[in-house]
Image (tube, helix red, strand yellow):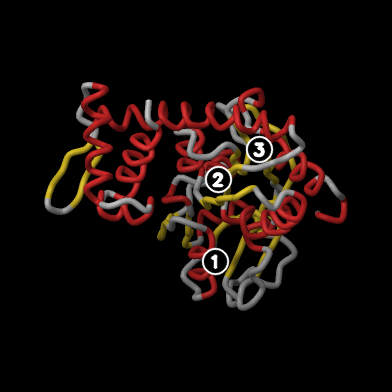
Amino acid sequence: MDNKKLYAFLKSAEIGSQAAAADALGYTPSAVSQLVSSLEKELGLTLLERSSKGVSVTEEGQGLIPLINDYLAHEQRIYDYAADINGLLTGSLAITAYPSAATNWLPEIVGKFSADHPEIHITIMECIRSDIYQNLDNNTAELGILTYVEPMPYEWIPLADEPMLAVLPEDHPLAASDSYPVAQAAGDKFILTSQGQDVEILNILRRNGVEPEIRYTTYDTPVTLAMVQQGLGVSIVNDLSARRWNDHIVKLPLDPPEKITFGIAFKSYDQLSTAARKFLDYAVKYLTRSEAR
């Protein structure tokens, strides 16, 4: 199978436009159209719905995307193996991660890794949990950095524990306290991240029998913290997420204390590329150093 057809389809599906896919791949629009049409004819499937506004992926096309990514990943591992035998390390690596980990950990890890392996192109995708799962399932990323919750559907290496904190506006009645009772959340206006589905926070509230008034929901923690700064409510976040936020906001440990475990998830260690395995080694060494904590 001609891989050009596969890349043309994947990029068209990702962008939603064959013209834009052509620009991204360095082809002409007609070439991309012909490649995708040829793939559809070869498979006997309609993969894209065409309209004047662009293209959308059919149900058959959606089902094919993870299979294509898996096929291309296996092919890349052949070249990775040959490069490893020859003492070289080339190729690409995609990592999907919580924004907190991507911001506070990955720049230094990537810097050290890239200094030793400059030929590896690294893509970082900052996502909430559901998107990290999707990226791993679709083989658009090999490694995912997130927190552990049951059930964990992937192989998992724990990296670091992070305490959970309450974040309050400066004028909150408990701003000068030593800690924030989780029960207090029942009486405060509450801001919840991850589109209102932050599993870690919801589990903490449930364990403590608290049903807060969830006044606002956000996609990601930085928006939540900015809203807390504006006095719109309180929230619970992990220390890593709030580490760079120190102005016009109060951070207190929870009572009772809570913590979460960050780690790296992947579908199968045996199926990881050489680049992913090497990066995994760097991440484990960096995040288990006492001075990294």
Task: Point out residue 134 in the picture as x, y percentages from the top left corner.
Answer: 45, 37
Mark pair 1, 2: CA separation:
22 Å
**Amino acid type of the residue that numbered disc 2 sits on in the rendered structure:** Thr
**Amino acid type of the residue that numbered disc 1 sits on in the rendered structure:** Leu
Q: Is residue 22 left or right of residue 98?
A: left
Relative to 174, does residue 195 appear above or below in the rendering?
Answer: above
Say which residue label 3 marks. Answer: 276
Q: Is label 1 in a helix, a strand or a loop?
A: helix
Relative to 78, does residue 212 appear above or below in the rendering?
Answer: below
Mark pair 3, 1: CA separation:
33 Å
Q: Is label 3 in a helix, a strand or a loop?
A: helix
**Amino acid type of the residue that numbered disc 3 sits on in the rendered structure:** Ala
Say which residue label 2 marks. Answer: 96
Sequence-wise, the earlier of marks 3 and 2 is 2
Q: Is residue 193 left or right of residue 18?
A: right
At a point 60% along the width and 29% down the height, the residue shown is 77
Pick the front one: 121 or 237: 121
Q: Nearer the viewer, mark 1 or mark 2?
A: 2
Q: Is label 2 in a helix, a strand or a loop?
A: strand
Say which residue label 1 marks. Answer: 225
